[in-house]
Amino acid sequence: MLEMLSYEFMQRAILASIIIGLVCSIIGVFVILKNLTFIGAGTSHAAFAGVTLGYLTGYNPLSVAIIFSLITVWIVGYLNKKGALMLDTSVGIFYSLTMALAVLFIGLMKVYNAEVYGYLFGSILSVTKMDLKVILILGTIVLSIVYLFFKEFHFITFDEEMAKASGIPTGWLSFLLLNMIALTIVVSLKSVGAILVFALIVTPAAAAYQLTYSMVRMFIYSGIIGVVSSVAGVLLSYWFDLPSGATTVLFVSGVFVLSVVFSPKRRIKELENG
């Protein structure tokens, strides 16, 4: 264990996994409670399209991924707010569009680039110092916003109409939440991959939801599950030479199964139903 931690790449991977696990699981609570699961899945594919365009044009892939992700949630949020399209419909259109762009950009590359596929399936052991800085900065931004607007987010999550009547700018806060989902996906893209990234956002929060009725406790449980699962994914992928993204998602999925089995909510419902 100590020998493993002496390697610089493992130090970066574990630090990145802690930040990613915490940020994803905290944002995941809002995603679960506000039923925004599908928009996250679509945004992860938009981020991947940004990565492929970054490699094609020579710009920083994560920077382009941020631009792609933000533009996607802005358009989807605008269409939903104006009532032009249902949220799931617009997300479905952009899901297909951005994946088509990603395939097109990969096809336009002159040579095979293995790093692109690292973003598709996840490779946290290859996180560089620059990647870690981006993860740390974006993670700090997301967590700081959640801390500053926690009461407002709490209000609009459970009763948006009442929050609006109370003078809280629900439209602006909902837009801010979509932006944080996009940034969280970009933060996690290299470690978990575009295909699996949203599992790390949804599953810890879904597991925590099985264990408590309190939103504050749900944040705590989700954070613990997210961090433990991310670090366990890194260690298991190193010890057994497994893909890091898939290992992390399989581990957190196992935690979710256990949370369902031991859920006090499920036992209460079973007693109520006789």
Image (cartoon, helix red, strand yellow):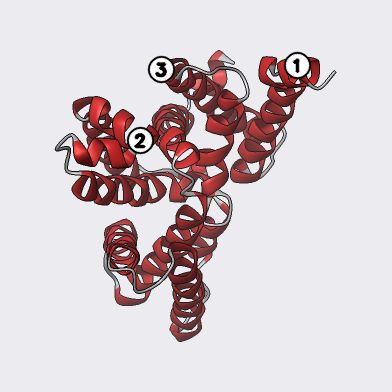
Marked residue nearer the N-terminal end (1 or 3): 3
- Residue 249 vertical position relative to residue 43 in the rendered view, above or below: above
C-alpha distance separating marks 2 and 3: 16 Å
Question: In terms of image quadrants, where is residue 267?
Answer: top right
Q: What residue type is labelled 2?
A: Asp
**Residue 171 placement, left or right of 65:** left
Secondary structure under badge 3?
A: helix
Asked whether the viewer can see residue 171, the reply is: yes
- Mark 2 Cα shell of 10 Å, populated few (<14), some (14-19), many (≥20): few
Earlier residue among tags 1 and 2: 2
Q: Which residue is drawn at 48% across and 70% down?
A: 89
How far apart are the two marked residues, 1 and 3, measured between alpha carbons? 22 Å
Q: Of label 2 and label 3, which has the lower sequence position?
A: 2
Residue plotted at (70% across, 19% down): 263
Residue that mark 2 sits on: 159
Q: Element at badge 2?
A: loop
Looking at the rendered image, the disc whose residue lies closer to the viewer, 1 or 3, is 1
